[in-house]
Image (tube, rainbow, N blue to C red):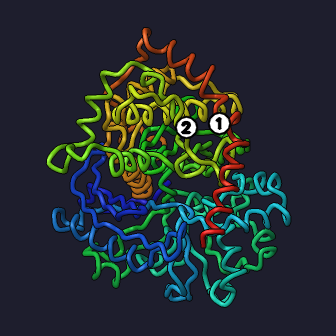
């Protein structure tokens, strides 16, 4: 149980340092927003396929976001704070926190060759059983190996190798500590034991001492230091509670604390899945430590989520649908009038390769069924439908592997604002879909852990029950559901496996063409 705090401390602070911004939100005991602040973050790409940020930007954005909150509420009211964050991103630093290079982001794709090396040294199956994740370029492990091979003086000379949570905890408290549910996305944790996989780290040339102590989500990791208080406007001594990666706290903020329900976070990348009460692995998902201590999240990730919708808006939306109009609203209205199946247009949404269930870093998206009758809004609806099909493929495999039936789905994230998309999900899934009550379930998940850590509730599930809820419920349309069911089972499921060999050959020939043109 979290330790209590005295005085008129009636709010908690959630901080979400994502890929694109740091956002701070003050929450009350019922999970309602009291005040919020947001500061954007820039992303750098020094080479094609690379993604980096400087950790000082995380701190400056977090300071700015928190200051916007404490300008609106008395910092003395804040009982505790908790940080969530973009996952897999990491940086080598000195003992005082000074970065030795820019952080390498989760979306960075420089480590494809290192995946092959890891398979040769450890075997992908063994790594999967140990870390809960089939190897992919998303996790930190192959990028750490890349640094060992390409920048050995940096990675080996680092006093610490830390993810976003650990770096911000140190900046906020002066302590080098992190959460188990923030460490595990790196792919460097022995998931069955809940500790760093020391043997794995040594084998790739790292030192276990470079990795910080781990605590369960909801534990108190320290208190806001005098220096951090001066920078942020927070009260020195405010408890800082162990958080979790943004995917796991989004699940918590959607109200999922036990098996039986599924969630889908319609964000830049789309994460979805279920809570499990035991550790298990399968190629159908990756296994994460849950934000509720002792639980796991069996998670699907589609890297090309609402980013694919944004790609459409940036490159295909009609020029006449300009900034003076809400382009999304225009295409929502046009697509709503189309029949299920987008008049024969089907899309496989692998715009940024595919993780589960194929784990193919060379996969690309595809659109099938083009005719001269199709227009831009057909493609827009096909994107929404394709992502819904992919989510059904994922959660169906998760449910089958875990042996837990899924009764309903909770949807959250920026894409959840689309009523059309929510209804498509209900029709494709053949199950009820509800919108999470909070528009920012990810930050709310951090607030729930802070509320538990502050002693407001005796357990994380009880904090979640008090602070979450759903609204805007959608039932499958009985006239539409059978159509989507047939499209999914008879076309979508077999589409990528059938075309995959041809796509692999296309990729190989494309690389040859680029090399010859260099």
Q: Residue at x 44, y 36 (%)?
A: 383
Tag 1 residue? 496
Crowding at mark 1 (Cα within 10 Å: few <14, some 14-19, many 20+): some
Q: Residue at x 32, y 28 (%)?
A: 335
For the C terminus, which image quadrant? bottom right
Front position in the image: 214 or 320: 320
Up the image or down, 453 lies above or below 67; here it is above
Q: Position of residue 32 (x, y in %)?
A: 26, 45
Residue 13 visible in the picture:
yes
Q: Position of residue 474 (x, y in %)?
A: 37, 22
Front position in the image: 445 or 451: 445
Q: Residue at x 59, y 44 (%)?
A: 299
Up the image or down, 448 lies above or below 264; here it is below
Up the image or down, 190 lies above or below 212; here it is above
User: Viewed as shown, does residue 478 lie left or right of 160?
Assistant: left
Front position in the image: 375 or 38: 375
Mark 2: secondary structure: strand
Front position in the image: 388 or 222: 388
Residue 457 visible in the picture:
no
Crowding at mark 2 (Cα within 10 Å: few <14, some 14-19, many 20+): many
Residue 41 in which image quadrant: bottom left
Q: In terms of sequence position, does the residue under pointer 2 or pointer 1 come before the other?
A: 2
Whether tag 2 and tag 1 are in contact, CB under 8 A, the answer is yes
What is the CA distance from the residue labelled 2 to the residue labelled 1? 7 Å
**Number of residue marks:** 2
Tag 2 residue? 348
Residue 420 in which image quadrant: top left
């Amino acid at each position: 149980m979290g330790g209590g705090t005295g005085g008129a401390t009636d709010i908690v602070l959630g901080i979400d340092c994502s890929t694109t911004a740091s956002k701070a939100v003050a929450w009350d005991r019922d999970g309602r927003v009291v005040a919020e602040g947001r500061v954007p973050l820039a992303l750098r790409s020094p080479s094609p396929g690379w993604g980096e940020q400087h950790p000082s930007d995380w701190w400056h954005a977090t300071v700015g976001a928190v200051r916007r909150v404490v300008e609106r509420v008395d910092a003395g009211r804040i009982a505790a704070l908790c940080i969530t964050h973009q996952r897999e991103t990491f940086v080598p630093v000195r003992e005082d926190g000074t970065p030795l290079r820019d952080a390498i982001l989760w979306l960075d794709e420089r480590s494809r060759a290192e995946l092959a090396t890891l398979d040769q040294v450890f075997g992908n199956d063994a790594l999967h059983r140990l870390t809960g994740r089939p190897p992919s370029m998303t996790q930190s492990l192959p990028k750490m190996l890349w640094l060992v091979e390409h920048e050995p003086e940096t990675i080996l000379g680092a006093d610490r190798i830390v993810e976003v949570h650990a770096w911000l905890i140190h900046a906020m408290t002066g302590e080098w500590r992190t959460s188990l549910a923030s460490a595990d996305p790196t792919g460097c944790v022995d998931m069955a034991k809940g500790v760093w996989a020391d043997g794995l780290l040594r084998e790739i040339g790292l030192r276990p001492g470079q990795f910080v102590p781990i605590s369960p989500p909801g534990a108190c990791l320290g208190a806001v230091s005098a220096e951090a208080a001066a920078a942020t406007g927070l009260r020195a001594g405010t408890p800082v509670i162990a958080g979790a990666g943004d995917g796991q706290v989004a699940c918590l903020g959607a109200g999922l604390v036990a098996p039986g329900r599924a969630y889908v976070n319609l964000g830049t990348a789309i994460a979805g899945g279920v809570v499990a009460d035991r550790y298990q692995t399968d190629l159908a998902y990756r296994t994460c430590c849950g934000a509720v201590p002792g639980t796991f999240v069996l998670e699907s990730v589609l890297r090309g989520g609402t980013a694919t919708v944004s790609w459409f808006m940036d490159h295909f939306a009609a020029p006449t649908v300009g900034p003076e109009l809400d382009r999304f609203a225009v295409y929502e209205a046009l697509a709503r009038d189309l029949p299920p199946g987008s008049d024969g247009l089907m899309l496989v949404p692998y715009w940024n390769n595919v993780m589960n269930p194929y784990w193919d870093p060379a996969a690309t998206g595809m659109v099938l069924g083009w005719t001269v009758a199709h227009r831009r809004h057909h493609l827009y609806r096909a994107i929404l439908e394709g992502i819904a099909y992919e989510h059904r493929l994922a959660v169906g495999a998760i449910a089958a592997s875990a042996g837990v039936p899924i009764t309903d789905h909770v949807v959250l994230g920026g894409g959840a604002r689309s009523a059309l998309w929510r209804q498509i999900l209900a029709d494709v899934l053949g199950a009820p879909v509800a919108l999470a009550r909070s528009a920012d379930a990810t930050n709310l998940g951090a607030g729930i852990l802070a509320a538990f850590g502050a002693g407001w509730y005796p357990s994380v599930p009880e904090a979640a029950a008090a602070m979450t809820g759903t609204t805007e419920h959608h039932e499958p349309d009985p006239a539409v559901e059978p159509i989507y069911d047939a499209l999914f089972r008879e076309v979508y499921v077999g589409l990528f496996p059938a075309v995959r060999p041809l796509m692999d050959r296309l990729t190989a020939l494309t690389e040859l063409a680029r090399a010859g043109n260099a």
